[in-house]
Amino acid sequence: MKAVLRSLFGENLKNLFFLNMLTVLGSLPVVTAGTAAATMDSLLVRLTEGDFIPRLAHEYWITYRRLLKKTVPATLLCLVYFAAMLWCMSVSHQLKTGGTGLYLISWFFAGAAALIAVWWFFILGTVNLSFQDSLWNALCLSFGRFPQSLAAGLIIWGMLYAAVLLYPASLAPYFVLFLAGAQAIGLAFLWKPLETLVLNRYERLDEEEETTEI
């Protein structure tokens, strides 16, 4: 964990600033927010592994276009799911009986989805797995490595929630570093299981691209 933090917040701090701004731009159409996040995750993993990326913006948009097809459906699924959970929470306040139970169940499933999403977009951005397989792996890892998932989820989603609460004062720091910084800290918590159970087991997306070019 310390090695990941030293790498990303030390020698790659400048790259974090650039990644943050690029990800904000890539998220402007809401349906591509997941694409932007997966692209950032992909490059954060590469930087952690010591890859030298001289043209970060160029590499970002190449990766962004490559991930677009499989991450937009993932983003739409997440948006629909969380919208459904918010609807259930709002309905729970109007019920005379059973409202508390529905409210607690909605929070449970929303929290579970938030932890799964943390893993899912790292997996989508780094290895060559289908939509279903990547989601299944994210589900297994979110509960199989629950302490790391919870720590990373609290950092990533907590930072986003804090930005909403502190709006508009949070706009400047969020656009400059908070987004990539939260993902970098989250990656530090997830790194060992991500490396062992995902990166070392499945074909990497960058390897697939090199094979295609050859």
Image: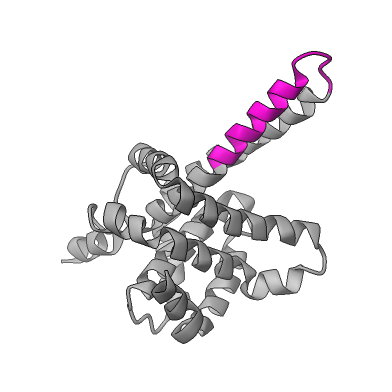
- Say above or below: 208 vs 4: above
- Left or right placement of residue 171 versus residue 134 in this view: right
Disc tally is 0
- Front residue of 200/193: it is 193
Q: Residue furthest left?
A: 214
Q: Position of residue 117 (x, y in %)?
A: 50, 46
Task: Return the residue found at the far front.
Answer: 147
Left/right placement of residue 138 relative to residue 73 reads left
Residue 50 as seen in the image, left or right of residue 172: left
Residue 96 vertical position relative to residue 70 in the rendered view, above or below: above
When the figure is inspected, residue 11 is found, relative to residue 125, above or below; the finding is: below
Image location (x, y in percent) of residue 137: 35, 42
- Where residue 187 sits, quadrant-wise, is bottom left
Front one among 120 and 80: 120
Foreground pick, 146 / 44: 146
Q: Decide whether residue 89 is among the magenta residues.
A: no
Instruction: Indicate how the structure is coloured in the image.
Output: one colour
The x, y position of residue 206, in whole percent, is 28, 64
Residue sitting at x 42%, y 58%: 190
Point out residue 60 in the picture as x, y percentages from the top left corner. 45, 70
Report the quarter where the N terminus lies: bottom left
- Compared to residue 136, the image places residue 119 above or below, namely below
Magenta: main secondary structure equals: helix
Q: Residue at x 38, y 39 (%)?
A: 140
The quarter of the picture where the C terminus appears is bottom left
- In the image, 104 versus 202, the foreground residue is 104
Question: Is residue 35 among what the camera can see?
Answer: yes
Residue 97 colored in magenta in the image: yes
Q: Which segment is the magenta one?
A: 94-113
The residue at 73%/59% (across/down) is: 162
**Does residue 80 show up?**
no
